[in-house]
Amino acid sequence: MTPVPPEFPPVVYLPCATHTEDPADAVVELRRTRDGRMALMAYSALDRLKYCCGEQQPWMVVPTPTLQRIQQVQPFELVLLDVIIPPEHRHGASDA
């Protein structure tokens, strides 16, 4: 994994595939970029996650150093911060 830039927040909010009671059961959503790389979407605050991903988006909050452990379980090639997901690709969209 590419080292996390020093300007990253100490904790990040991560979109998850489904709502879960136990964080150990959470599956982080990964997105494929236009150039084919697998990206982990991270958000610097809960309000940004909701604005960028929609109100229906399941999420979890983790300390930024935890991203390395997540990468071992769910491999990704880059981390993108505070990226807006188009409405048609959000949870709850009619064709999502």
Image (cartoon, rainbow, N blue to C red):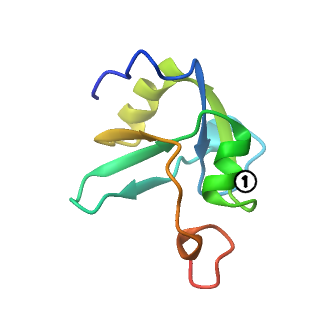
Residue, x 31% and y 21% (percent of image)?
3
Residue, x 46% and y 28% (percent of image)?
67
**Where 43 falls versus 54 (above or below)?**
above
| Residue 45, x across and y down, in percent | 67, 35
- The picture quadrant where one finds residue 23 is top right
User: What's under tag 1, amino acid-wise?
Assistant: His
Residue 71 vs residue 37, the one in the foreground: 37
| Residue 19, x across and y down, in percent | 72, 53
**Where 76 falls versus 31 (above or below)?**
above
| Residue 92, x across and y down, in percent | 69, 73
Q: Is residue 31 visible?
A: yes
Residue 11 vs residue 20, the one in the foreground: 11
**Where 5 falls versus 26 (above or below)?**
above
Residue, x 61% and y 54% (percent of image)?
52
Compared across the picture, whether 12 is left or right of 68 comes to: right
**Where 11 falls versus 80 (above or below)?**
above
Residue 79 vs residue 30, the one in the foreground: 79
Is disc 1 surrounded by few (<14), some (14 to 19) or many (20+) residues within 10 Å?
some
Q: Quadrant of the C terminus?
A: bottom right
Q: Quadrant of the N terminus?
A: top left
Residue, x 68% and y 61% (percent of image)?
54
Residue identifier under label 1:
19
